[in-house]
Image (cartoon, grey):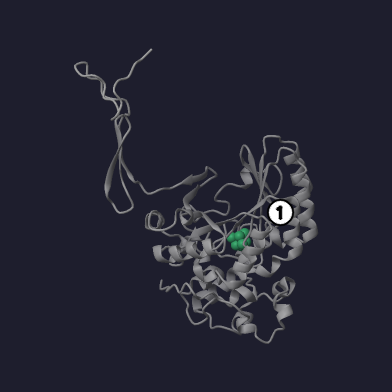
């Protein structure tokens, strides 16, 4: 993995599509209509490797191939190891089933009282509102249903899901996800947000979306007006590599931020893509500059055909150790494993603590230096001597 960060350079412009009128380029419907979805379309701009061709041949049965022209421009077509290319272009590894993998590795279906609604934690639900995305990530946790390549026939029942939320007063937090909720029309999105906002016990509404990254043109004034109207709406975007941080993404994040949408980022740790301290440091610094707080760094879920993306957990710990204390605290995400089978998110942290006794905790700092923090604060009793008193105090009288 070779990546050299130039903090002053942010990709901008129409790249391979210079001939397209700017108004079309900035139109999210044009971007969707002109997605690259076939080998022939890809090969107009790049030469695929044999491994990629084999992967593409299988994509229709696994997870559709689709890349917006905007995001395709960020791929280095001359480098088969380009970290964005590996995320988007299928490879033959997708056809290999490895130990521990399955199509629903988090057992979401087992926690779904209504199609499209996952109720795993008592006070919050995951509301899967669509199976469509602007582009498809080859490591997607929900590849079983996203794009419907596997004939999963996912039909979210919005009305039933809303009624379930309305009738469960313990639900205070609703996360809209999918697929990508921002692919819904403004009208549908406004309907969902207005219904959720009208439920008195729903305190917190958030959206998980990779649209700002794949299709920043979708963040229109009409959309941000909806967020203003029903806010606060929180949003987790999904950026994995500093090359994804462009002038357009930064501007989209600003539009969201100025509409009062707090932004966090979720990255997936991906082998030979971002499992490197310097790459992640460059990414989190760019995120802060875009007003986005790095939130989670996920160990990849055990989805079918995902082994070629699976990074070593020790790499994740090395990244957190390489960030904590070495850069701004706001820039350090929480490294997390979503427990296979549906056990929920578990934080995985480097161990800084060496020992804890009744007297003291002993730990090392980010430079490896050892420190002791005393836990006992009462003065040591000494019957032969008066209790120590602070300098300048003559005596202590107890009534
Ligand atoms: S945008 Fe999200 S839901 Fe869609 S393919 Fe990528 S990871 Fe999966």
Residue drawn where x is 65% and y is 57% of the image:
145
Q: Residue drawn at (70%, 67%), measured in percent from left and top?
A: 218
Query: Does 182 appear above or below 163?
Result: below
Q: Quadrant of the N terminus?
A: bottom left
Mark 1 Cβ inside 8 Å of ligand 1? no
**Residue 151 in the image, given as x and y percentages of width and height:** 68, 60
Residue 330 visible in image: yes
Can residue 157 be seen from the camera position used here?
no
The quarter of the rendering in which ligand 1 is drawn is bottom right
Location of mark 1 (residue): 129
Seen from the viewer's position, the closer of residues 271 and 391 is 391
Q: Residue at x 73, y 55 (%)?
A: 228
**Image coords of residue 74 (percent x, y):** 56, 75
- The image quarter containing residue 11 is bottom right
From the viewer's perspective, tell me whether residue 175 is left or right of residue 284.
right
Q: Position of residue 233 (x, y in %)?
A: 68, 51
The reply, left or right, for residue 8 in relation to residue 177 is left
Residue nearest the viewer, comparing 166 with 302 = 166
């Amino acid at each position: 993995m070779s990546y050299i960060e130039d903090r002053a350079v942010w990709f901008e412009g129409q790249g391979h599509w210079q001939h397209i009128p700017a108004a079309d380029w900035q139109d999210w419907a044009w971007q969707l209509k002109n997605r690259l979805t076939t080998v022939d379309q890809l090969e107009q701009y790049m030469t695929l490797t044999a491994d990629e061709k084999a992967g593409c041949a299988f994509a229709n049965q696994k997870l559709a191939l689709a890349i917006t022209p905007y995001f395709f421009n960020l791929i280095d077509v001359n480098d088969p190891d380009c970290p964005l290319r590996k995320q988007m272009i299928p490879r033959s590894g997708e056809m290999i089933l490895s130990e521990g993998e399955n199509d629903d590795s988090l057992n979401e279906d087992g926690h779904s009282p209504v199609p499209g609604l996952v109720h795993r934690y008592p006070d919050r639900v995951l509301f899967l509102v669509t199976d469509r995305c602007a582009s498809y990530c080859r490591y997607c946790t929900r590849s079983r249903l996203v794009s419907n390549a596997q004939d999963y026939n996912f039909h979210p029942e919005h009305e039933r899901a809303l009624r379930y939320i309305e009738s469960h007063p313990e639900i205070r937090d609703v996360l809209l996800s999918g697929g990508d909720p921002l692919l819904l029309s403004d009208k549908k999105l406004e309907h969902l947000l207005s219904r959720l906002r009208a439920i008195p016990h729903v305190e917190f509404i958030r959206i998980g979306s990779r649209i700002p990254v794949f299709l920043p043109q979708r963040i229109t004034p009409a959309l941000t007006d909806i967020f203003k109207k029903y806010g606060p709406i929180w949003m987790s975007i999904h950026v994995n590599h500093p090359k994804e941080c462009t002038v357009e993404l930064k501007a989209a994040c600003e539009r969201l931020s100025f509409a009062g949408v707090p932004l966090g980022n979720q990255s997936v740790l991906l082998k030979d893509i971002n499992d490197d301290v310097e790459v992640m440091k460059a990414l989190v610094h760019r995120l802060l500059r875009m007003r986005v707080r790095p939130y989670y760094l996920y160990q990849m879920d055990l989805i079918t055909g995902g082994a070629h993306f699976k990074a070593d957990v020790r790499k994740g710990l090395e990244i957190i150790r390489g960030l904590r204390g070495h850069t701004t605290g706001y820039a350090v995400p929480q490294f997390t494993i979503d427990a296979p089978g549906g056990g929920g998110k578990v934080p995985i942290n480097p161990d800084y603590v060496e020992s804890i006794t009744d007297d003291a905790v002993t730990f090392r700092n980010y430079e490896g230096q050892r420190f002791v923090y005393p836990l006992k604060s009462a003065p040591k009793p000494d019957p032969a001597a008066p209790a120590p008193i602070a300098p300048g105090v003559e005596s202590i009288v107890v009534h």
